[in-house]
Every structure is written in structure tokens, then in C-alpha cells.
Image (tube, helix red, strand yellow):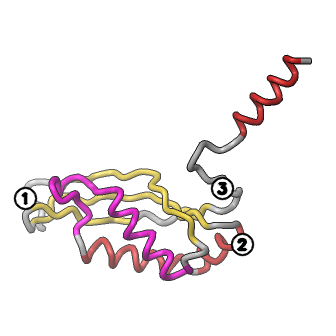
């Protein structure tokens, strides 16, 4: 009997989200098209960052609205990464993921509605350096 109680308690604790972690309903994530962001160091194009991300909506119904406005969101993302550098202030060759996430999240919330977008998650960020002799 005691073992059954402990087993049930353990199962509940294992299934519960960690502190500060929100449970995301299935169907709430919207995968975004690749974003190609220039990496500028000393006013020179040194690489491109290929960013794979997904927007997490607050509900599956809101995810449908995100999908309906996907082209507008992607346009805002492209304009954003081309308007301002994505590198860290002290290391411009390294993507400042926290700052980029905040910027892209603000873009998505502006377009879809702040209450409809929970967060943005980066799936991968791959750097592709420019080759010597390439036009920049």
C-alpha cells in the first residue's frame, strides 16, 4: 500500500512541469521558415546565421492565427535582422540569442497580438562564414 502511494506520488511529480516552466498544449507550436541573418563585424559582412525557430502560441486556436499571419511575421523577422546587428555587443561574430529572441518575440506579438504568443524557441542556429574573395 505504501509503495503504491509513493509510486503514484512519484508519477505525479514526474508529470508536473518544473518550477517556472509552463505546460504547452499540443498543437500550439508553429514552425517558422528559415531566417537568414547577416553577421556584421567591423562594418563588414563576415557570415550568415541560418536560424530555425518556432513560435509557441498560448493555445492551439491562437496557433492557427499565427499560421494565418506567418508571411507577415516572417517579413517582420527579415526586416528586423537586416536593420540591426544580431551579434553580441562584446563579440559581434556570436549571435546574441537572448536579444534576438526578445526582438523576434516583440515582432510576433505586435503582428498577432501580445496575448496570443507565449514565446519563441530557437531550434538551431547555424553559422556560415563568408569565404575569402566573396563579395560583401
Relative height, residue 92 to residue 6 (above, below): below
Who is closer to the viewer here, 79 or 15? 15
- Quadrant where the C terminus lies? bottom left
Relative height, residue 14 to residue 6 (above, below): below
Of pointers 1 and 3, the one earlier in the residue sequence: 3
Q: Which residues are magenta?
A: 85-113
Q: Horizontally, is 122 left or right of 66 in the view?
A: left
Q: Is residue 92 magenta?
A: yes
Q: In the image, what residue occupies the spot 62% across and 53% down?
A: 22
List the residue tagged with mark 2. 61
Element under label 1? loop
The residue carrying pointer 1 sits among few (fewer than 14), some (14 to 19) or many (20 or more) residues within 10 Å by Cα, namely few
Q: In the image, what residue occupies the spot 65% across and 56% down?
A: 24
Q: Nearer the viewer, mark 2 or mark 1?
A: 2
Q: Quadrant of residue 60?
A: bottom right
Q: Position of residue 14 (x, y in %)?
A: 70, 34
List the residue tagged with mark 3. 24
The span from disc 2 to disc 3 (Cα, nearest Å) is 13 Å
Element under label 2? helix
The span from disc 1 to disc 3 (Cα, nearest Å) is 47 Å
2 and 1 marks in contact (CB < 8 Å): no
Relative height, residue 15 to residue 80 (above, below): above
1 and 3 marks in contact (CB < 8 Å): no
The span from disc 2 to disc 1 (Cα, nearest Å) is 49 Å
The residue carrying pointer 2 sits among few (fewer than 14), some (14 to 19) or many (20 or more) residues within 10 Å by Cα, namely few
Of pointers 2 and 1, the one earlier in the residue sequence: 2
List the residue tagged with mark 1. 133
Of pointers 2 and 3, the one earlier in the residue sequence: 3
The residue carrying pointer 3 sits among few (fewer than 14), some (14 to 19) or many (20 or more) residues within 10 Å by Cα, namely some
Amino acid at each position: 500500500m505504501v509503495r503504491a502511494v509513493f509510486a503514484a506520488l512519484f508519477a505525479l511529480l514526474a508529470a508536473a512541469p518544473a518550477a517556472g516552466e509552463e505546460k504547452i498544449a499540443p498543437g500550439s507550436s508553429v514552425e517558422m521558415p528559415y531566417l537568414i541573418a547577416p553577421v556584421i563585424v567591423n562594418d563588414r559582412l563576415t557570415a550568415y546565421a541560418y536560424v530555425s525557430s518556432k513560435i509557441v502560441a498560448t493555445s492551439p486556436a491562437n496557433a492557427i492565427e499565427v499560421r494565418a499571419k506567418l508571411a507577415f511575421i516572417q517579413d517582420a523577422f527579415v526586416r528586423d535582422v537586416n536593420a540591426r546587428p544580431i551579434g553580441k555587443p562584446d563579440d559581434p561574430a556570436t549571435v546574441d540569442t537572448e536579444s534576438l529572441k526578445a526582438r523576434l518575440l516583440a515582432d510576433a506579438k505586435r503582428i498577432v497580438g501580445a496575448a496570443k504568443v507565449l514565446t519563441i524557441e530557437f531550434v538551431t542556429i547555424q553559422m556560415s562564414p563568408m569565404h575569402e574573395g566573396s563579395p560583401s
